[in-house]
Image (cartoon, rainbow, N blue to C red):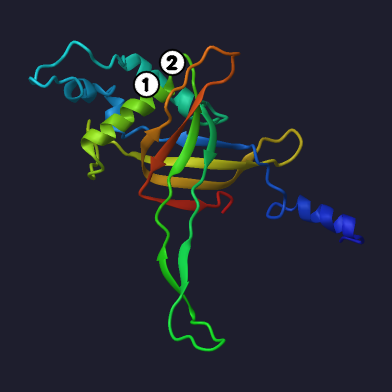
Amino acid sequence: MATSPYQYYNEILSNWPTAIAPQSQWFVSIDFDKVGVVKNGFNNINNYDNESKSGNISSNYWNLPNSTTENLISVINQRGTESLIGCVFVRDITIPSDGVDINNKGLDYGGYQAPTTANTRNKQKKLSMTFNETNSSFIDFIIRPWIVNVGYFGLIARDKGDRKVKATSIDVVYLARTGPNSPSIPRKIFTFFGVVPTSVNAINSQYQSEGLQYSTVEFSYDYYVVRDPTQ
C-alpha cells in the first residue's frame, strides 16, 4: 500500500489499465484475402482502361506482373512472421474522428436557452495512411490500380470474385510494454470493415538531397469497431 504520493503515482503507472501508453508502438494489418481485383493482378485494368475510342485494345497497358503483386501482398510483407509486424510499408496512420451534431432547439425567451438536442451523427471521415516508397512500389503497384478498379466496379456488394474491391478488414493494433525482456502485447485494436482506397497523393520528383519518399492514401469503409484484446 502506498505511503506517499510518489509511491501511489508509481503504483498507478504500474497497473495495466492506468499505465502510460507508448505513442510509437502500433502496426497495421490489411486483409487482402478476398480482394479479387488485387488477387487477380489487376488484369481488368488492361481490359477496360486501354480501349481506344474505336473500341480496339491499344498496345499500351498496365504492366503489373502477378509475381510483383503477389510479393507486395504476401504474408511476409503484410502480416510479418510469428512476431507479427504488420504491413511493412505503412509509415503513419490517422484514425478518423467521430462525433454527433448538437444544437439548441425549442422555446427560448428572456435569459433562458432552448434545450440541447442531438441531431445526427457526423458524416464518416476517411481513414488516412501514409506508405513508404520502395523499389517495388506498394503505392503505385497496389494502391493506384486498386483505386482505378474501385472506379470501374463501384462498391456493389460482392461476396467474392475478380470484381470484389473491398478488403474485408484493416486492423490497427496498438501495443503496450509489459516489462524488461518481455514482448509488447496489444492494448487496443481499431478494426475497419469493407475498406477501399479512394485517393492517393500526386508524385513530386525533384533533383535534391536524398530522403524518404512516401504518399498519403485515404480509405473509405463501411463501419469500424474498437476492441479490447485483453478481455
User: Looking at the image, which is closer to me, 164 or 109?
Assistant: 109
Q: Quadrant of residue 6?
A: bottom right
Residue 121 vs residue 91: left or right?
left
Res 87 visible: no
> How dense is the environment of label 2, judged by Cα within 10 Å: few (below 14), some, or many (20 and up)?
few
Placement of the C terminus among the 4 image quadrants: bottom right
Q: Residue furthest front?
A: 110
The residue lying furthest to the bottom in this view is 110
For mark 2, give the secondary structure. Answer: loop
Q: Is residue 138 above or below residue 195?
A: above
Q: Which residue is mark 2?
A: 136
Placement of 86 over or under 23, stated as above or below: above
Q: Residues within 10 Å of mark 1 (few under 14, many from 20)?
A: many
| Residue 80 image offset from top left, x and y in percent | 51, 27
Mark 2 belongs to which amino acid?
A: Ser
Tell me the kind of residue under disc 1: Phe
Residue 201, located in which quarter of the rendered image? top left
For the residue labelled by badge 1, is the local secondary structure a helix, a strand or a loop?
helix
Q: Which mark is residue 141?
A: 1
